[in-house]
Each structure stands twice: as C-alpha cells, then as structure tokens.
Amino acid sequence: MIRKYTFGNPFNTEAVVVKLDEEKTLLPFFEVREKKEFVLRLKDSDVVYGLGEQVRGINKRGWHYTNFNADNPHHHEDTRSLYGSHNFLIISGEETFGVFFDYPGRIEYDIGYKRRDTMVISADSSDMDIYIILPEEGKYKELSIVKQFRRLIGKSYVPPMWAFGFGQSRWGYKTEDDIRQVALEYEKADIPLDSIYMDIDYMDSYKDFTVDKSKFPDLKQLSSDMKDKGIHLVPIIDAGVKIEKGYDVYEEGVAENYFCKDKNGEDFIGAVWPGSVHFPDFLNPLARDWFGGKYKVLTDSGIDGFWNDMNEPAIFYTRDRLNDTLKEMEEVVSENMGIIEFFHFTGMIEDLKGNEGDYTKFYHNVDGKMICHNDVHNIYGMNMTRAANEALNKINPDKRTLFFSRSSYIGAHRFGGIWQGDNKSWWSHILLSMQQLPALNMAGFLFIGCDTGGFGCDTTEDMMMRWVQYSLFTPLFRNHSSDGTRLQELYRFSNVKNLGEMIKIRYSLIPYLYSEFLKAYKNDEMMFKPLSFEFTEDDLAKDIDDQLLLGDSVMIAPIYKQNAHGRYVYLPEPMMLIRMRSVDDFETVNLTKGVHYVKADLNELIFFIRDGKAIPVCKTCKSTSQINPGTIKLMGFKDATYEQYFDDGISSDLSRITVKTIGNNN
Ligand code: GLC
C-alpha cells in the first residue's frame, strides 16, 4: 500500500508515473518539526536500507548523508554526496516501511549520526511529496515494498544485449589508431570484447556532437570496421556546450534561448573541459528535444551507444567567482603572510571547482517561470539522459540504444543506466561498488556497474584480477581509467592469460545475467539483493554486507583484499561452491549452511549456486553477437530447472520477452 503526503507546493520531478491522491491524514512514523525536519526514532534492531549511490555499507545507519549531486572523484567514508540522489529508504525492523522523499533540491539524511537512535531528514524547503510504502502480507516485507515502489516510478531502462559484453575504455584514446590498436591487442590476446569507449578526445576542442577530423578522419568507416569485429564504439557526451562563434550547437542554443540564464537573463557561463560553456536547459522540453536531436550526428556514423557525463552539472569555475577570488588573494598574499592566511589562500583555489554557490546563479525556464537551478539541481542529469533517450527513440524507434549517465535522480532509471563515477584503484572501492548495487536496484537502476580496475590512481595486476572477478557479475562491465594513471587494458598485465579466462567466463554467464536482468525489469524486482531480503528470519544475514544474492540462483562473495587466498563466507542455506579457473577448468563443492573459509587463489573465481538451483551457461565466444543459445547447459544442482527470460536482445518492443523453463536435458 502506498500513501502520498504533500507538503507545501512541490516541484513536479516526474520521478513518479502513477497518479495518487494526496492523503489528508498526518504523515505516519515521522514527527514533523517546524524547521522542515522529519524525525524518526530508530530502535536498536532497525536496519536502514537504500539511498542508492552513497558511501558506507548496505545498512545506512551511523552517518550523515547529503543528496546534492556532486562531481566528486573522492569517494571516502566521510564523503557526503556523490553523483546521484536516490531519496528512497526502507526502515526494516519491528515495523517495516519504505519512504520516498520526492524533492529535487538538497536534502540531508542524518541516520543516527548526531544521535544513534534518531533519524532526521531535512531539506532546504519543505515543498515535497513524501510517499510511504507499507509491505503487503507475507514474509518478504522489503521485497514487497521495493516492488510497489518500482511500480510507482515506472519501468527500468533495458539496454541492447551487446551492452552485457565486456567494454574497454580509457581517458584518453586520442586517435583512430589508438582505437584500432585496442581492438587488435584484445584480438591478439584472444579476449572477448563488445565495446570500445571514446572519451572527450574524439571531439573537436571538446565540442559536443563534433568529431576531430585530424584524429578521426572517418568515424563512419571506423565504426563499421569495428562492427565487423563485433565491437561497438561508445562516445561520451558532456553537458556543457562550448561558447564558440560559428559552432552550430552554440549558435542555435543562443538563438532559441535553450541555455540556462543568469539573473539578468543572459546565458549563464561556466567553465568545464571545453573552457567557457553554456548549459542546455534540460528542464525545458523544447531544449531537450533540440539537444537530443543532435545525437543523430553520431548515430549517422553508425554509433549506437552513448555515455552522458559532467551532468550534475560539473562546473570547474565561473568567471565571476574567479575574479572575486583573485581579488581576495591579492589581499591575503603579503610579504608576511601567516600560516592561517596561507591555508585560507590554498583553500580559495580548491573552492573554485564544484563550488555549490554557482548553482544559485542560474535559472531554468519551466513553463515560462524562472526556477533557480539550486532548487532543482538533482534532476538536471536525469533530464539530459531523458533528452537523449527520447530523441533516440524517435531517430531509431525499433532498436534499443545503450545509454548510461553519471548524474541521476529516481526517474532517470527509465531512460538509461548509470556508472558509479570516478572511483579509485583502491581495494575498498570494489566493496563500495558492491554495496551500492542493491540500493541502486531499489531505486530502479538495473543497468549499473563501476569503472573496473579503478578510474583514478594506479591499479595493480592482482587488483585488476580481483576487480574483474567482481565486475564480471555486474550488467555494465567496463574497464575505464583516468588520463595519467597506469595503463590498465587487460593485455598490459603479465597475467593476461588468466584475466582473459575471466572475461570468457563472463561471456558464458551472459544467458544467466541477461535473463535475471530481464526478469528484474519485467517483474519490477531487484537483480542484486542483500541476503537479509530473502533470509528474513536470519539475524546473521542482516550483518552481511560483502555478499549479495544475484538473481534467483546465485550468491556472490567477491574477494576485495590484497594478497588474500580466500575469504570467509556466510551461507544462509546449503549452497554449491563453484571455483573456476576457466570455462572448462572448475570444481564444485557442496557446502552446508554456516560460515566457511573458502580458498580462492588469485586466478580463481568463486561464486555460489543456491540450494536446489541451477544457472544457464553457454559456450563462451568472442562477442555477444556470437552467443549461441543452442549451447546453453545448466550448471548447479542435479534435477534443478531454470526459468529463462530472453528476447532478441535489440528490439525496442519489450513485450517480446519470452520465458521458458529449461532442465538438465535441454
Ligand atoms: C569525468 C568522467 C570520466 C571521464 C573524464 C574525462 O571525470 O567521470 O569518466 O573519463 O571526465 O572525460
């Protein structure tokens, strides 16, 4: 049961697709305080799930989170905001319920931070819709809440099946030759590959929807040559539009008033990769339609996938703030500058990038009304992906296009996937990615994954191996890294052979992963679940936050510690351990319920098949285009059957998804 409570005059975020009448009764569970605060007492045994892309563990108790989308490459334990705002929580305990704060501006979640037994939610304004979701009868309260919530916010985005293949990315491949070289090296190393990503260097001076002809003379030919090898090129699109006379996107945007305005009605200026830019007003449907239409420049060259970036929007600096800062610096720097002044001086430079004050300086045109960006900040990125998705559905109505975005809000899950942003080559970031997966699924995001190997910092051979062993279970499986870090294409490492075996295992698991993805889509369910969502009576399961249930038949327990030769795993029921070195070289061991130390050398992948279950596994291949359903066999418990969801992997018409039960004899 879902109840809607309206406070003040909320902005319509379009997160919700089902119209509900407003309740006239008081908001249950929470005490509503004057200072726009919603307060809930937490019992010792309460567990708080959700918040999507956020730091810390699966149980969110014990920290103060801020949802205000940020271009923040430092994902620390004390980080407050990341790239997305997913304001949905489940409080699980004696009374279990879900709550969604549908609010597009900054919102704070003190979940037992000031006081361990108290949760306080507060926002800049109290103009918001709050949805309370109560579980239906039955044992799986959390799952029942998620299902109802997912119906409220609409169907998740489904990418083409090729997006489940392995992707190689790097900031930055600078020329056509760089791209061809990557494809060649993967071929030589005999490692399957479905996509190569093109970061900002393919553009002419970082101008959206342009291609630098001196470095990529014939994108159409390149894209077609790559397709012949089963490889899709996936270019990046950034939010900011370069200010440059004669550049069509700039000229049209200015002429049609499609850019965000400053308080004087002039086009607002920020600086990002291209230098000075204007930001398209994605909240204006006309601007969305116009910007979305531009993707055709690339689809005409055979491109069928995009990643949208810098759409919080990221602002490196604004001219006004820079000028003010320079003036202040002059005042601070003197012959006998003290140490306090010195730190103030260095802080001023750091404050330029991503300064939240800049978000109060520009406006959107919503139905003819000027709305300050700060008040609707968290839905900007979602509307950029929406622009692309809606336009591509017109340009290419029959086929699915790959989309994923950095910034998001609940609702964006209908238009594309997300990647988890600029992580680092840190062991702890394998765990962080894993802990976000169920919370993202709760919020509707199914096509998700992180920069495998880590984006910032230098990775190592063993870290890459363990990271691959984790990421090979995530729908988006992409190796991506930052300019200036150690090169980390898999063929750079001495254990390339073993890394390749892991990628081949991924390809053999695609029938299972894709089926579980479609199942989660069709039934509004979670693909990745905390153990406690299914083992609801098991107190130990509540504490497990480095293992996840993956679909109906699998539990994953990745290794995320350096030099580990195995790990402790908690089995909430008897399961079958699978330990794989390659598609053909593996063993299975039946384990009892309880805690086990499971050995796994560096080149060994471990995962578990749930009691009485099985998974479909196909013959591995070089790219998803070569997957042969005729080779599918079941792996797991004898006599188990599996309900497989499948389709042709490309049609936009998702009503064609078919379900069939397969057994050991199929
Ligand atoms: C941002 C993106 C990253 C990309 C870089 C250059 O940091 O998050 O993925 O490589 O910009 O475009």
Image: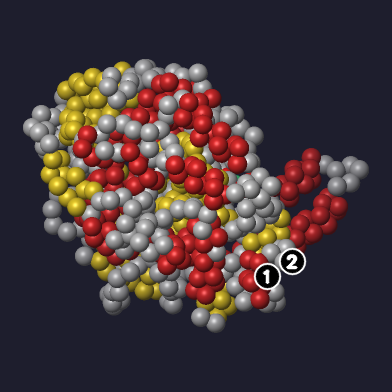
Left or right, 269 with reference to 640 = right
Of the 4 image quadrants, the one containing the C terminus is top left
Q: Nearer the viewer, residue 227 or 378?
A: 227
Q: Secondary structure at mark 1?
A: helix
Q: Eyeballing the image, is 470 above or below 650?
A: above
Q: Position of residue 246 (x, y in %)?
A: 72, 66
Q: Nearer the viewer, residue 611 or 235?
A: 235
Q: Residue at x 69, y 52 (%)?
A: 205
Q: Residue at x 38, y 33 (%)?
A: 622
Q: Residue at x 52, y 75 (%)?
A: 286
Q: Position of residue 32 (x, y in %)?
A: 38, 67
Q: Is residue 420 visible?
A: no
Q: How many numbered marks does the figure carry?
A: 2
Q: Eyeballing the image, is 602 above or below 641?
A: above
Q: Amino acid at mark 2?
A: Lys
Q: Eyeballing the image, is 342 above or below 364?
A: above
Q: Secondary structure at mark 2?
A: loop
Query: Which residue was labeled with disc 2?
Result: 245
Residue 318 lies in what quarter of the image?
Answer: bottom right
Residue at the extreme right: 335
Of the 4 image quadrants, the one containing the N terminus is bottom left
Q: Residue at x 82, y 51 (%)?
A: 329
Q: Are marks 2 and 1 in contact (CB under 8 Å)?
A: yes
Crowd tier of the residue under label 2, counting other residues whose Cα lies within 10 Å: few below 14, some 14–19, many 20 or above = few
Measure the alpha-carbon separation of dots 2 and 1: 7 Å
Residue at the extreme left: 639
Q: Position of residue 371 (x, y in %)?
A: 56, 74
Q: Amino acid at mark 1?
A: Glu
Which label was assigned to residue 251?
1
First along the sequence among labels 2 and 1 = 2
Crowd tier of the residue under label 1, counting other residues whose Cα lies within 10 Å: few below 14, some 14–19, many 20 or above = few
